[in-house]
Structure formats: C-alpha cells, structure tokens
Amino acid sequence: MLIGEYIHTIDKKNRISLPFKFRKEMGKKVIITPGLEQCLFIFTNKEWEKVSRKLSDSSEGLSFLKADQRNFNRYMFGRAAEAEIDSIGRILIPDFLKDRIGLKDKAAIIGVEDRVEVWNEKAWLQNQEVVEKRAGELAEKLAEKK
C-alpha cells in the first residue's frame, strides 16, 4: 500500500526522487498520467492494467460508443507516459505533464493506496487546507453511501 506525504525537489532535468518505500513497491517502470484536481497520477504497471480494463469496460465491450467515456479515455490514455525509475529512484516528468500542474522547484508526492500523486507543492497545501476544513462532512457523506 502506498501511503504518506513527502516534499521533494525537482532537478533541472525534470526528475523527482520517489520515496524509498514507494520504490520498493513500484518496480522499475511506472505510468504517469494526468490526474484529477491538478495533480499527476503515477501507477505501477499492474495497477495501470487494472485502470485500463475498467476505463475500457462497457457492457457491450465497445467503450468508444459513449462520448463521456471516449473523452475521459483520451484524457487519461492520450497524455499518459511510461517512465523508468533510475538506479537512485528518480523518474523523469515529461514537460507537458510538468507544465500541466505548474511544477517548478518542489513537488508534493502523496501515496494514495494504489497510486502516487504528484502535486505542485503550493496547490497541495491549498487543497489540504480546504479538505481538512471539510473532513467531517466528507466522512459523513462516505458513511451514508455504505
């Protein structure tokens, strides 16, 4: 399970270091894709296969027939990139993904169970401030669904 919050610097070559405990679970190659709420998602190959199957699934097996599904699949698959984890645990963030979330000097690297999220540090802190104020309300909503 991927958990925890880390702040790491981004080097001049657009590389960030993954936390050691994440590297142990992630293997040598990962998939980086646009996430939601102004972050990037990083998946292991195994998790990416699960996500791919779910996104491509439809009752008829023809996911391209539904406009919303086509558009979301384009968003996730079209901007996805494979990345290798180098010998010291760094991955290269492609420019188009780095620019998408405004990564500059520092990134917040967040373990969220089955994926890692990469955030612009400032955006992460702002997001957390909002979520912390609503934590009780969010917990109530989640409890109602069960």
Image (cartoon, grey):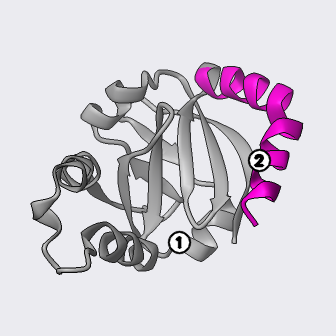
Label 1 sits on residue: 26
For the residue marked with disc 1, what is the amino acid? Met
Q: Amino acid at mark 2?
A: Lys
Instruction: Pinpoint residue 130: horizontal percent, then vertical percent.
Output: 74, 23
Farthest residue, direction right:
136
Q: Main secondary structure of the magenta part?
A: helix
Secondary structure type for disc 1:
helix
Residue at x 16%, y 50% (from the top left corner): 67
Q: Residue at x 35, y 50 (%)?
A: 33
Q: Is residue 67 above or below residue 11?
A: below
Q: Is residue 26 magenta?
A: no
Q: Quadrant of the N terminus?
A: bottom right
Task: Characterize the local packing of mark 1: few (<14), some (14-19) or many (20 or more) Cα atoms within 10 angstroms.
Answer: many
Label placed on residue 141? 2
Instruction: Give residue 4's position: percent from left, percent from top.
Output: 76, 53
The quadrant of the image that shows the C terminus is bottom right
Q: Position of residue 143 (x, y in %)?
A: 82, 57
In the foreground, 86 or 76: 76
Q: Is the residue 32 above or below the residue 51 in the image?
A: above
Q: CA distance from mark 1 to mark 2?
A: 32 Å
Q: Earlier in the sequence, mark 1 or mark 2?
A: 1
The magenta segment is: 123-146
Q: Residue at x 47, y 31 (%)?
A: 38
